[in-house]
Amino acid sequence: MNGKGKGYIALSITSIVWGTTWVASKIGVKEVPALQMASIRQFLAGTFLVAFFLIYKKMPLPTAKQFRWLLVMAFLMFVFANGFSMWGIQYIPAGLGALIGALYPLSVVVIERVFLKKKNMTAITFIGLFLGIAGIAIVFYEHAFAHQGPNFFLGLCLSIFAMLAWSLGTVFLSRNKANLNPYYGTGWQMLIGSVILFIMAYTTQKPVNIFSISINTWGIIAYLVAVGSVGAFIAFIYSMKKLPAAIASLYAYINPLVAMLAASFLLNEHLTMNILWGSIVTLSGVYLVNYSIKKTNEKIIAEAEL
C-alpha cells in the first residue's frame, strides 16, 4: 500500500477515534466527576509526552517566558476547552457536545472580526455562519424536547463556553508563537492543565477515591489516553503528511457524526432524521466558513506577492 493509501487509513482512524472519545467520556463521567476524569486523562497523557521528550529526546525544560505561554494555553485549551467540554457532556448528549465543539471555526471568525477588526468575512462566510447557527438550532430543538435531564441547559452552557475557549486558544496561538516543539508543548499544557483541573475538581465537585474506580472506567481512561490522546494524534499527524490539508482536515466534519451514531448505538441517545440533517447543515456551514477563510488568505498572499 502506498503512502496516500496509508494516509486515508490514518484519516479514518482519526475520525473514528476522536468521534468515539466523546462517547467514552460520556460513559466515564457516569462514575468519575468530569473535572477529575479530565485531570486524570491529561496527567497520564501529559506525563507520557513530557517524559518522552525530556528523557529520550533530551529536550531542556521550558524557559520562564515559554512557561507563561504554556500556562495561558493550558487554561484555554485543556482546562476550559477540554475540561469543561467533558463537564458539559455529563448533562447533554455526547453527539450534541461533539457538534458544539465542531463550531469553533465559526466563533474564531467572529472573534477576529469583532475584537481584532480583521476583515476576513465574505458572502460565503456569512452563508456559512447562517447555516452553522440554523443547523445547531435544529439539533438543539430536537434534543430540548427529548426528555433531557434537569441540568441540560447547564451542560449546554458549559459546552458552548468550552468551544469559545478553544476558539480563543486558536486565536491566541495564531498571534503568539513559542519556540517550542509542538508535541512537547502539548505535553506540558496537559500536565499544567491536569494540576489546575485537579484543584478545581476537589473544590467544586465531589471526587471519588481513585482506588475505588472500577476496572471498566479505568479501561475507558486507558482508551482516552492511549488511543484518543496519543494514538489518534499520531494518526492525524501522519494523515497531514501524506494527504492534502483539505482532505486531512475532513476529520473535523466526520467525527461529530461518528459521535452521534456511536452514542445512539452504545448509549441509546436520541437520534432522529432532523438531528442528522441539522448536523449536516451545521457541518456544511463550518466547511463554508473554513473554505472562505482559506480563499481570503490565498488572495491576501497573492496580492502581497505582486
Image (cartoon, rainbow, N blue to C red):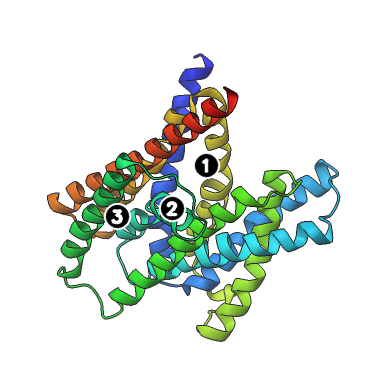
Residue 145, labelled with which disc?
none
Residue appearing at x 21%, y 54% in the figure:
134
SS for dot 3 = helix
Residue type, mark 3 in image: Ala
Residue appearing at x 24%, y 48% in the figure:
131
Between discs 2 and 3, the one toward the N terminus: 2
In the image, 245 versus 55, the foreground residue is 245
Residue type, mark 2 in image: Thr
- List x then y, in percent, for residue 222: 54, 55
Horizontal side of 279 relative to 292 (left or right) equals: left
Estimate the spatial distance between the alpha carbons at disc 1 and disc 2, rounded to whole Å.
Answer: 10 Å
Residue type, mark 1 in image: Ala
SS for dot 1 = helix
Read off the residue under disc 2.
Answer: 21
SS for dot 2 = helix
**Is residue 27 in view from this perspective?**
yes
Residue 232, labelled with which disc?
1
Label 1 close to label 3 by CB (< 8 Å): no
Where residue 12 sits, quadrant-wise, is: top left
In the image, 270 versus 294, the foreground residue is 294
- List x then y, in percent, for residue 107: 41, 56
Between discs 1 and 2, the one toward the N terminus: 2
The residue lying furthest to the front in this view is: 306
Residue appearing at x 59%, y 46% in the figure:
230
Estimate the spatial distance between the alpha carbons at disc 2 and disc 3, rounded to whole Å.
Answer: 10 Å
Where residue 151 sits, quadrant-wise, is: bottom left
Residue 263, labelled with which disc?
3
Residue appearing at x 52%, y 72% in the figure:
35
How many residues crowd mark 3 within 10 Å: few (<14), some (14–19), many (20+)? many
